Image (cartoon, helix red, strand yellow):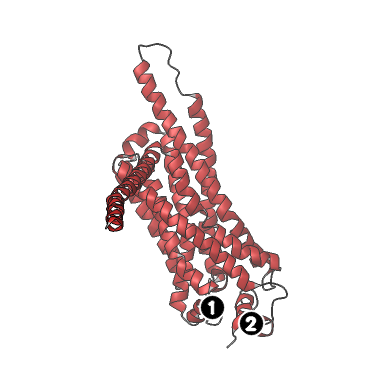
């Protein structure tokens, strides 16, 4: 058994080396313990803010009735909120098993638990990609074929599509239980545990297939949105002013949601891209160990993938006027209740203070 820093170095090196003599060589100048701590700090800041903001967004959606009476797009947005909450919780076992000494020792030799934690961590990225892809496809359908979308894409259909997407994610992860290269004394990480065939024929095709699909759908969506903007009718007379106004407001609403999707996609690429680029660099030079800078980037960019769970709900609040109004009302009512409580407490304290002063005067007189 290796303890302390030597054990940490050995664990980290085994991600890249498969030679026992090289495996336990100390790292030159890299303080892995510090890198692990910084990674966990970033992660748990995201977890703290992400859980609060997403739960607040879920509450606002239910409060405003957008979930039961809103557009089908709101079902997909709600799915992204649920996805973020599940991701923030499901990634915890993986982080414990890879970034804490107790967790590293505990997971040794526990194959099923190890693979489950990796699948739970990958759920963070898979659910975000599939969720954004589903939302983009629904918006493209709405912009390109508005009449068909109006009659065919109901809230019920949207919910069924969401269920199917989660089944796809679950099946992708389940395959890893049967197709893996698990070794008891090596790190509990996908770069080590997943079989090469699983990575090449299951994981990467689905991952980059969805990324490519999101890119294509957004280009088409941009083209259709620009075309729709140019096609927004201008009111020329008072005769058809009401009809024109309704049509214009509807199209403007659709375009506003499209802009929102572009922001979500940009956040997804910004938070997801760096970590997967680093993973490909490590895979390309394996079995040689990458430079210290790449190792540092590997851990820190992993934490960066959770930043979207904090940014997304902030975007929801800014883009949806109903949610924004509900949150503002709630905050104002909370402040007013606190103010009333403080005034009530001050009133309760005032008579006792006066009584004390009066009794003091009577005592001094006596």
Circle 1 sits in a helix, a strand or a loop, which is it? helix
Q: Residues within 10 Å of mark 1 (few under 14, many from 20)?
A: some
278 over 31 or under it: above or below? above
Q: Residue 224: which numbered mark, if any? A: none
Is any part of residue 128 visible from this angle?
Answer: yes
Is mark 2 in CB contact (under 8 Å) with mark 1? no
Quadrant of the rendered image containing residue 324: top left
Residue at the far front: name it: 366
245 over 47 or under it: above or below? above
Query: Cα distance, mark 2 to mark 1?
Result: 12 Å
Is any part of residue 158 visible from this angle?
Answer: no
Relative to 17, 337 lies left or right: left
Residue depicted at x 61% and y 56%: 274
Residue under label 2: 6
Residue at the far right: name it: 28
Residue under label 1: 101
- How many numbered dots are placed on residues in this image? 2
Dividing the image into 4 quarters, which one contains the C terminus? bottom left
Circle 2 sits in a helix, a strand or a loop, which is it? helix
Residue depicted at x 42% and y 56%: 51
């Amino acid at each position: 058994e290796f303890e302390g820093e030597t054990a940490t170095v050995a664990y980290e090196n085994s991600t890249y080396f498969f030679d026992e003599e090289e495996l336990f060589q100390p790292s030159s100048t890299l303080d892995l313990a510090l890198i692990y701590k910084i990674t966990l700090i970033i992660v748990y800041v995201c977890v703290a803010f992400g859980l609060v903001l997403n739960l607040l967004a879920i509450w606002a959606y239910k409060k405003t009735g957008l979930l039961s009476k809103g557009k089908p797009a709101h079902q997909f947005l709600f799915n992204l909120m649920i996805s973020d909450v599940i991701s923030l919780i499901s990634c915890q076992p993986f982080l414990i098993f890879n970034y804490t000494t107790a967790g590293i020792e505990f997971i040794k030799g526990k194959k099923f638990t190890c693979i489950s934690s990796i699948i739970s961590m990958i759920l963070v990225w898979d659910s975000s990609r599939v969720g954004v892809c589903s939302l983009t496809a629904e918006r493209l359908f709405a912009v390109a074929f508005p009449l068909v979308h109006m009659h065919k894409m109901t809230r019920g259909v949207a919910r069924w599509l969401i269920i199917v997407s989660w089944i796809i994610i679950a099946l992708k992860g389940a395959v890893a239980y049967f197709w893996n290269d698990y070794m008891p004394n090596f790190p509990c990480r996908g770069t080590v545990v997943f079989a090469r065939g699983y990575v090449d024929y299951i994981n990467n095709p689905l991952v980059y297939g969805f990324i490519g699909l999101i890119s294509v759908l957004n280009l088409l969506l941009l083209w259709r949105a620009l075309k729709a903007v140019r096609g927004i009718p201008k009111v020329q007379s008072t005769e058809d002013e009401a009809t024109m106004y309704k049509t214009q407001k509807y199209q403007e609403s659709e375009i506003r949601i499209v802009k929102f999707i572009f922001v979500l996609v940009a956040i997804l690429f910004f938070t997801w891209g760096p970590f997967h680029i680093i993973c490909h660099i490590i895979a390309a030079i394996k079995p040689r160990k990458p430079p210290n800078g790449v190792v540092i980037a590997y851990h820190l960019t992993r934490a960066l993938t959770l930043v979207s769970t904090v940014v997304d709900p902030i975007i929801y609040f800014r883009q949806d006027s109903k949610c924004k109004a509900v949150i503002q009302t709630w905050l104002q009512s909370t402040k007013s209740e606190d103010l009333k409580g403080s005034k009530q407490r001050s009133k309760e304290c005032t008579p006792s203070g006066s009584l004390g002063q009066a009794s003091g005067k009577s005592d001094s007189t006596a």
